[in-house]
Amino acid sequence: MRLLLIGTGPFGVPAFERLAEGPHEIVGVVTTPIKILGKGVAPPCPVREFALSRGIPLLEPERINSSEAHQQIRSLRPDLLVLCDYGQILSAETLGLAPLGGVNLHASLLPKYRGAAPIPWAIYHGETETGVSVIHMTPEVDAGPVIAQAALAIDPEETAGELEVRLAQLGAELLPKAIELVATGEAKPIPQDPQLASKAPRLKKSHGQIDWARSAQQIKNQVRAMSPWPRAYTFWLRNDRPPVRLILHRVDVASEASGEKPPGTVLEAEKDRLIVNTGQGQLAVLSIQPEGRNVLTAAEFLRGYRMKAGDQLGTPQLSGM
């Protein structure tokens, strides 16, 4: 078959590499155009780099559903569109440009976690298992029938960035098998149950802000989920001094039992123990980063900053921002 690969981020690159080594012809790669940052620096685009390294024709339309993009795609005569981690929704007309339509590699066990950020939200909600799905694409986001799935256990200490690497490798195993089922006509897509669907919206910086009324385990999950971006953060609320924004890099549940102080109260702050009360349980902060500074262990932070038991972490009032 003639495959047109569509993607932008790093998640699909291992699968695309595997397809490029397989029996099907890669007629082109569609990715998002480069947007130059400050000082003329272009951000890395893993899919673009993959296409250039392989000498595959590269298309970079602003809008894949535009008539101009459609003309470019038609010229390549693809049999199947293969999408992963792209960032634009393909219209019915775009999907119709290939006789076999399109398939999408998605980083969840659909219908769970439809949307742009399935990996962080699975960790955030305390899932112990996730996986990858290959679906026949429809104009509705991640709602098409499932061709193939593979599951993976989530390590209780794993961050979203670490889990993404493992899921990308799992996707590289699954996607070629699913495409072979399509090529041979043996695919038997299973419709998703919309009653079981959940959403995984694109992350915002505000998703990293910690609510200390949540449990210690939930906050630990949030810290893992928001790594490497946007990072989980809170503020050290100091009397008569500006609050300090603190990014939490590594934490653990110190106790399932809460202390007597309000959530967000520092219970211990000496030597290498930085313990904070939560709505349920106590949280040990293992590594922390004051805004604009390097990441510090708890011991390094406590040597350099005068945090003490009884201090409060939380959200500053607007007047104090």
Image (cartoon, grey):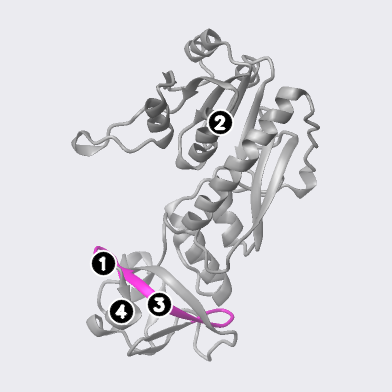
Image height of 140 relative to 79, above or below: below
Q: CA distance from mark 4 to mark 3?
A: 21 Å
Are the residues at dot 2 and dot 1 in contact (C-beta closer than 8 Å)? no
User: In the displayed structure, would residue 94 be above or below residue 196?
Assistant: above
| Residue neighbourhood size for the residue with mark 1, other residues' Cα within 10 Å, grouped as few (<14), some (14–19), many (≥20) | few
The quarter of the picture where residue 237 lies is bottom left
The magenta segment is 277-293
| Mark 1 vs mark 3, CA separation in Å | 14 Å
Q: Would you say the residues marked 1 and 3 are in contact, meaning their CB atoms lie under 8 Å apart?
A: no
Q: Residue at x 45, y 39 (%)?
A: 9
Q: Tell me residue 263's x, y (percent).
A: 50, 80
Residue 222, percent from left and from top: 52, 64
Residue 221, located in which quarter of the rendered image? bottom right
Whole-angstrom CA distance, mark 3 to mark 2, is 42 Å
Q: Which mark is residue 294?
A: 1
Q: Marks 2 and 1, how far apart in space? A: 41 Å
Q: Is residue 239 visible?
A: no
Instruction: Residue under label 2, please give it.
Output: 19
Contact check, label 4 and label 1, Cβ < 8 Å: no
Q: Earlier in the sequence, mark 1 or mark 3?
A: 3
Report the side of 182 relative to 271 (left or right): right
Q: Counting other residues with Cα less than 10 Å from the Cα at mark 3, is it few (<14), some (14-19), or many (20 or more)?
A: some
Q: Residue at (80%, 36%) from the top-left corner? A: 191
- Residue 27, position in %: x, y? 52, 17
Label 3: state its secondary structure. Answer: strand
Whether residue 289 appears in magenta in the rendering, the answer is: yes
Residue located at (30% from left, 79% from top):
238
Amino acid type of the residue tagged 2 in the rendering: Leu
Write down the residue under mark 4.
238
Give the residue number, with chain letter if any, for mark 3: 286
